[in-house]
Image: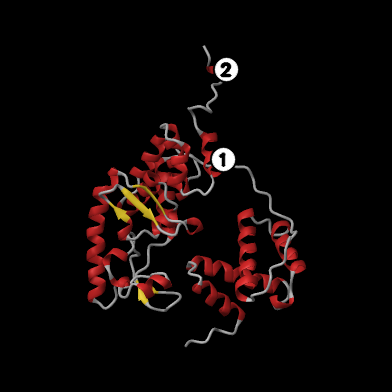
Amino acid sequence: MERPPTKLLDRARHRIRLKGYSIRTEQSYVSWIRRFILFHNKRHPQDMGKEEIEAYLTHLAVNRHVAPSTQNQAFNALLFLYRNVLEIEFPENVNAYRSKRPLRLPTVLTKAETMKIISMITGFHQIMVKVLYGSGLRAIECLRLRVKDLDFDMNQIFVRNGKGGVDRATVLPDDIKDPLRQHLIYIRQLHENDLSKGYGSVYLPYALSKKYKNADRKFVWQYVFPAKTISNDPRSGIKRRHHIHHSSLNKAIKNATQTARVKKLVSSHTFRHSFATHLLQDGYDIRTVQELLGHKDVSTTMIYTHVLNKGGNAVRSPLDRK
């Protein structure tokens, strides 16, 4: 039986992987733990407690001016460290200065702007952006889609292990069915070519790789949007084809927005915002939109009612009254 590592950061990585967390979470948590230790002159967290945690989180807010979500991420990393790695009680009522969350409305495109930007994108990047807008997926959810998650007969896309570890189903637009089918033909050929060269395996979470033997080489488990090249898995060292990088999608969106001359700050998440807003404009119930987006609380979805230009919450300017 493999012995668990003894170095603290390696122990943290080991525990994170046992919990089935993503590589992004692993990299983030380990980075925050390392920064926490360096901030306190390399003292061992075992010898630190509430005072040191509060000092570090306050430093992030006051001196580093980090966003609230960033400060929360650091807090969660330290919480994981104490509870799951050191296995000691995390201090109660941590009273650090909290970063203030600015009240900002999401950037939303009009339907015309959305389609204009999409028309400026080519290839599989266009299919991806259509998935973001047509299905309301987060960018990382789109990147992680597997072939088996597409249900053409039921008009559904299944999002596995989304934010908060929750699965959900959302709509598969008719508009992208044919392009997706053609794209999957290419993906199958790519996969078969990889298999012929001795590759063809894909990353599976630890539990799935143990439960389903050889599933990592099956076509249904392959990424819908795979990377162009085979690379070494940062965890196992195995050479395999991962999904494309987030930066590739962002670059395509940025270039298309500039070409379309849309004067808004557009990111991959803007299409998710536009999906929700346009559904509400079309009269869909907010609870339905909440389920499609995968929001835990309807209050999160309510933000889109503030950017509607028509409907029950609309206000008509007195200047426009005849």
The percent position of residue 58, horizontal first and vertical second, equals 73, 60
Vertical arrangement, residue 20 with respect to residue 176, above or below? below
Three-letter amino acid code of the residue under disc 1: Leu
Q: Is residue 72 left or right of residue 164?
A: right
| Residue at x 69%, y 68% (from the top left corner) | 90
Residue 318's mark? 2
Determine whether the residue tagged by mark 2 lies in a helix, strand or loop: helix
Residue 282 picture quarter = top left
Q: Residues within 10 Å of mark 2 (few under 14, many from 20)?
A: few
The percent position of residue 322, horizontal first and vertical second, equals 51, 11
Residue 274 visible (yes or no) = no
Residue 43's mark? none
Q: Which colour scheme is used?
A: secondary structure
Determine whether the residue tagged by mark 1 lies in a helix, strand or loop: loop
Residue 227 visible (yes or no) = yes
Residue 160 picture quarter = bottom left
Q: Residues within 10 Å of mark 1 (few under 14, many from 20)?
A: few
- 2 or 1: tag closer to the N-terminus: 1
Three-letter amino acid code of the residue under disc 2: Pro
Vertical arrangement, residue 183 with respect to residue 13, above or below? above
Towards the viewer: 150 or 127: 150
Disc 1 target residue = 105
The percent position of residue 169, horizontal first and vertical second, equals 38, 50
